[in-house]
Amino acid sequence: MKSRSPLVNRIAIVVCAVVLTSIVSMATTLAVSKSIEGNATAINLTGALRMGAFRLLSHVASGQESSVGENNLQNMASQYGLSLRDNNNIARAIPDTEDHPLAKQYQAIQAYWEQTLRPGLENHPPGSFASADIIAATQSYVNSVDQLVSMLERRTEARIGLLHLIQMISLAFSILIIIALFVDLRNRVLKPLRKLVSIANAVSEQDFSHKANLKGSDELAQLGSAFDQMNSELALTYSNLEERARSKTEELEKSHAALQLLHASSRDLFANHDLCSGAVPMLQELEQLLGIGPIRLYLHDKQSAEPVQAVTTASVERPFYCRDHHCNACLVTPEVYDELPIEEHDGRRLLLPIRTPGKLLGTLEVWYPVEKGLSDTARRLLETLSDQLATAIFLEQQITEEQQLTLVEERTVIARELHDSLAQSLSYLKMQVARLRRLGIEGEQKNAHNAILDELSTGLNSAYRQLRELLATFRLKLDTPDLATALRKTIEEFSERLGKPIELIYNLPPQALSPNEEIHTLQIVREGLANAVKHADATEISVEVVFESPQVQARIRDNGKGLPEGGQPVNHYGLIIMQDRARTLGGQVAVQDRNEGGVEVTLTFVPKSRHLIPAEVSNT
């Protein structure tokens, strides 16, 4: 079926109108520009006539009296007159009609030259200066030339203005054509195209409810009818598949996000040695993805009867194990916490073991809403995550144990060297002191001799005792690679020496101290126990090693006789050694009498693993 007003015909008419307007504009522009061709040169040459007149006047006024000068003036005047009459460049700028103002002015200038100015210049007496009449005549001539120049300029400007007017008319006509084209295109092309594009976009979004309903019989109206028919057929085709496609899309999106999360969690868990900072952001992202939470991670510590919480994604108060007091990742307001699906708020709990072959490392506790449940995809994702956590925790423990075993081996070598060198040397010195005692020196030097031997014996015994305790500590760590077990064995040792059981309170989080910090803490506790057993005459002793975030505090209390007046027993350097060890840890040791009797030794320091916590917080 033919179209009554096809788009191609309308566009062809508009293009022809634009082309015709362009041709007319270019033709008139060419004619006007041709009419003013050479005007600029004529203006320049006419202006040069003024300079020539002044040169002639200057020559007359120079006062030359020779016949050579007079002939020169006549030659100059003849040449000037020739350039005025027969100059083709000026003549082309002058209209051919005699009654034209430019032609009249040009003829008046020629007549004034021939009849007035030239005779006046040639008849001027040689050797005399220019008279007022000749100067006035020259000035009148120059004024006529200036008027001719002004007339040429105005004529040129008028032609240029006509050229501008033609261009503006052409531009206006072109704009009217373009506006008409735009209006026609908007009504006949753009609006239908927008409808068709909107229908196409809706179809791409699986929305088949839009219709074009275009009126007319042109190409776009026919295309709109075809779109409406196609839309109806597609709506019938996709009506039964839409729900299945939506569910598949959601499943694919969750699967894609789950894969990305697993990849990121694997990288972060194995790259970040801090389980809390490495796991909390990832677990929170998992909660948002699956609509679950909170999630808590518990580690199984062989020294603790109950699992120890190591990570949580939501807490009202700062957790006990927190290392970074500037981090608020797991802190939420009570209002937010009350909305979480925990046991008190209609929540269900899923417990997933974190294990490696043959070893249970911890438990992953996941809460989710009762009404929503937990899909199979989410459960599989959580099981995969627990496997990744198990691998990361196992590798971290392996690294820690290897570091501790390396330290134990080094300390075993040191203990062997001390036993084979320093211990034998001290034994040899003790035997030499015993030999000196049996010499039995008599006379005035006997008392001084015995006093020196007593001091030597006391010093050697003290050094030998400290060496035995040091070797005992080294050997104790060899069999007990963690601080809790080493402290228990130390308590058992000193309980036997005291004759009564010593109370021990211990609540440090797992891996709170480095191997070096464990060594110095154990040595200070042993030194404090040794002082209480040997010097205090105590009957009750207690040891408390606790974590008060971010500080670790170790306290040794006894009910003995207290400190002497000097603050330290004679010939005993244990307190100085404890202070040196405390400074090595970056902390301090306080030794003071208790109000109820006895002495309290307190070690306070911030573990190096808490380096993120500022000093002002650690001092609180």
Image (spheres, rainbow, N blue to C red):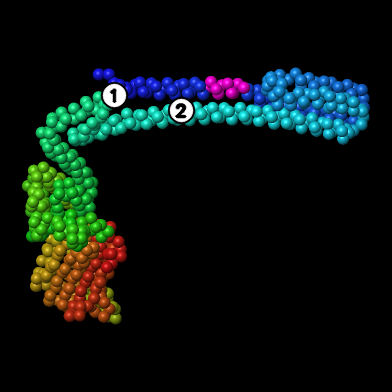
> Marks 2 and 1, how far apart in space?
26 Å
Quarter of the picture containing the C terminus is bottom left
Vertical relation: 269 (above or below) 195: below
- Viewer-proximal residue among 298 and 167: 167
Secondary structure, magenta segment, majority class? helix
Residue 236 placement (x, y as % from top left): 13, 31
Residue 596 versus residue 491 in the image, above or below: below
Answer yes or no: is residue 35 visible: yes
User: Front-most of 346 and 464?
Assistant: 346
| Identity, as a three-letter code, of the amino acid under mark 1 | Asp
Circle 1 Cα neighbour tier, 10 Å, few/some/many (<14 / 14–19 / ≥20): some
Q: Earlier in the sequence, mark 2 or mark 1?
A: 2
Q: Residue at x 11, y 72 (%)?
A: 498
Give the residue at x 92% y 25%.
Answer: 66
Residue type at numbered disc 2? Ser
- Give the residue displayed 17% in from the left and 78% down from the top: 560
Q: Secondary structure at mark 2?
A: helix
- As helix, strand or loop, the secondary structure at mark 1 comes to loop
What is the magenta range? 26-35
Numbered label attached to residue 174? 2
Does the magenta-highlighted stretch encompass residue 260? no
Any mark on residue 218, and which? 1
